[in-house]
């Protein structure tokens, strides 16, 4: 599968382009369209806090904590299972490390 390289802001130049994928994320409560960073070297999918909240997840109801590594090792994260759909492909379940802050990109590993 090929992914389109693009920037997030008009002030960025082509050297700032990264592979991004638009898709739909759904919970039992809400659905939203998002654009994520495709990181083929990542070992986990990462979901920023505000997207989880927008999908109706409640942080205090989660019971497990996921230990993260690298630049996220000091971040609290909890597992969150969501439905995802790219274009007209079938819906799949994706597990995310839902991070309790927003200064991380949405990452598909």
Image (cartoon, rainbow, N blue to C red):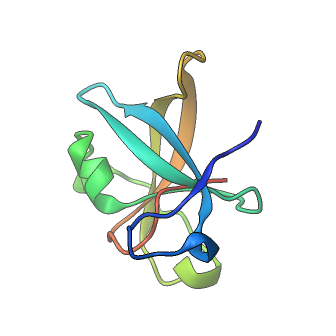
Query: Which of these two is toward me, 14 or 69?
Result: 14
Horizontal relation, residue 31 to residue 75: left or right: left
- Which image quarter: residue 59? bottom left
Horizontal relation, residue 94 to residue 41: left or right: left
Rendered location of residue 13, percent (x, y): 53, 75
For the point 68% across and 59% down, the residue is 39
Query: Which of these two is toward me, 30 or 69?
Result: 30
The quarter of the rendered structure image containing the N terminus is top right
- Which image quarter: residue 50? bottom left
Residue 41 lies, with reference to residue 85, above or below; the image says below
Is residue 61 among what the camera can see? Answer: no
Residue 21 lies, with reference to residue 103, above or below; the image says above
- Which image quarter: residue 27? top left
Horizontal relation, residue 10 to residue 89: left or right: left
Rendered location of residue 100, percent (x, y): 34, 68
For the point 22% across and 45% down, the residue is 54
Query: Which of these two is toward me, 7 or 68?
Result: 7
Rendered location of residue 55, percent (x, y): 27, 40
Is residue 48 among what the camera can see? Answer: yes
Rendered location of residue 91, percent (x, y): 54, 19
Query: Which of these two is toward me, 32 or 81?
Result: 32
Horizontal relation, residue 18 to residue 43: left or right: left
Figure label count? 0
């Amino acid at each position: 599968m090929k992914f389109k390289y693009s920037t997030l802001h008009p002030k960025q130049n082509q050297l700032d382009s990264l592979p991004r994928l638009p898709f739909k994320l759904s919970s039992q409560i809400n659905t939203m369209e998002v654009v994520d960073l495709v990181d083929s070297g990542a070992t986990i999918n990462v979901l920023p806090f505000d997207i989880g909240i927008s999908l109706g997840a409640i942080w205090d109801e989660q019971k497990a904590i996921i230990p993260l590594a690298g630049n996220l090792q000091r971040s609290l994260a909890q597992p969150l299972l969501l439905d995802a759909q790219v274009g007209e492909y079938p819906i799949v379940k994706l597990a995310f490390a839902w991070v309790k802050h927003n200064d991380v990109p949405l990452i598909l590993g």
